[in-house]
Image (cartoon, grey):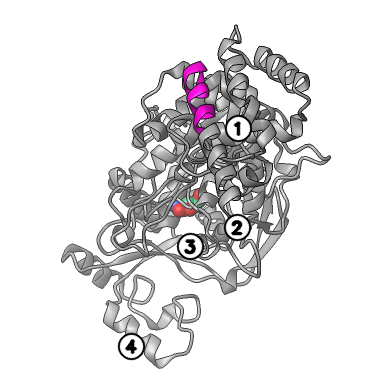
Amino acid sequence: MAVRVRFAPSPTGALHIGGVRTALYNYLFARQQGGTFILRVEDTDQNRFVPGAEDYIIESLRWTGLLPDEGVGFGGDAGPYRQSDRKEIYQKYAHELVARGHAYYAFDTPEALENRRQGEDNFTYNHLTRNSLSNSLTLPAGEVESRLAMAEPFVIRLLVQPGYDIHIRDLIRGDVTFQSGELDDKVLLKADGMPTYHLANIVDDHLMEITHVIRGEEWLPSTAHHVLLYRGFGWEDTMPAFAHLPLILKPVGNGKLSKRDGAKFGMPVFPLGWKGETAEESFTGFREAGFLPEAVINFLALLGWHPGGDREIFNIEDLTASFSIDHIGKSGARFDYEKAKWFNQKYIQAADDAVLATHIRPLAEAKGYLVSDEYLARTAGLMKERVTFLPDFVEQGYYLFEPVRDYDTETLQKKWSAALAQVFDDLIAVVAGTEPFEGEALEEAVKSFIQEKGLKPGDVLPLLRIGLAGTTKGPAVFDMAAVLGKEKTVQRLALLKKQGDQVLQNALSA
Ligand code: GLU
């Protein structure tokens, strides 16, 4: 049977990074099995609906490259893929389940239920309480009919009988057992005619011919109800296989990674930035922090999936080839932000300079740096071994786009000497006369000049770096000169000479 999997987020706010991991595992499994990856938007809970959240989900999938084959915004034959567009379908199935004897109408008002809750500890609507409540199991048939005919508000509840075990064979957790007597009679269809998550999820998984449900561990307890729904509808033969993913844990301490941890630990926990109504509800994303999407994918893939061996770098093709549900762990995976940064460094270092340039372009433009693609690519090549985040290219490496702002005066004072001052203008002339104006030729010319004058490279080269970048920590000095070009290099070295002269004068007058 052709594999069909779905990512089924609810648009209740920014998509948590754990949701992106769920999407990724579904995507990888589909790609590997030659199957279909579907995006279904589960928006039946009107109270929790947040405008913009659906677009955010789609943009997150586009940014990470996890493009669905079918779904909201992507087309397909099993739609509509937005649950609020499928209301009538769920209503039909809810009533059908009543007719099949596996669900019932309940007329209890919210007030009546609230009274029961007040009066009883841990009140639940289940096999112990339903007989004393107002539903189609307790009311005479005629009354039920007349209440329905009078359009009295009702909900439809799943009828869960006590006394037997429900087994779920989970591809990650193995056999998981629930006792039916412990389950409540879940609402399937609400008084406003909207389905609950449980009903809509099962009806859609069935109609969309989903073969594998890969989702977060928090949905494991609901699965018992889901199995009963499949049975009730007579769909057990085509029930999907389940795989419940381990939790993503906080970087330190106990518990699940939460959206508050982002601010607490100074790291993103969302793929993209999100502008909420308050500052507290607004979050930065991996994209805005300056991550390459490929690095985020690699990082997330290893958050719960253990391929075995020491290898850590897997691009999306490698992941598709090696991924297997068998190697997903049961225990929670710690969200290690330092590791995410490490992946980003590795992916930046390995990236093509021209590709990096396309990522740096908007950052450079925001700072008013108007340069050619070629120049950007060359600066990328120069800096990529030294940065962690994309904005570092224009922030740490600002001197490749504008004059040096800060000089390492301490090193300048320590290293500048009268001997150097004497020959520095000649050194500038040598630099200016070097053809071609390229790293290797410059290195050769300057090094032989240094030797000729009886100076040591260690005394001169750090100063040249300070001249071009303001710091000794910049890129290799001759490559930097080549990128800056003759004119700027010569100007900056002349400025350095002036500063050196000042250092000597200060020393004399001190
Ligand atoms: N709408 C649920 C969520 O927001 C989907 C859970 C599932 O995949 O069944 O996570």
Is label 1 in a helix, a strand or a loop? Answer: helix
- Amino acid carrying mark 3 in the image: Ala
Residue 487 horizontal/vertical position (percent)? 47, 18
**Label 2 to label 4, Cα distance in Å?**
33 Å
Please name the predominant secondary structure of the magenta segment in the image. helix
Image disc number at residue 348? 1
Q: Residue furthest front?
A: 509
Residue at numbered disc 4: 115
Is label 2 in a helix, a strand or a loop? Answer: helix
Labels in figure, total:
4
Q: Residue furthest top?
A: 435
Is label 4 in a helix, a strand or a loop? Answer: helix
Going from the N terminus, do you reach mark 2 or mark 1 first?
Answer: 2
Residue 470 horizontal/vertical position (percent)? 55, 39
Residue at numbered disc 3: 263
Going from the N terminus, do you reach mark 2 or mark 4 first?
Answer: 4
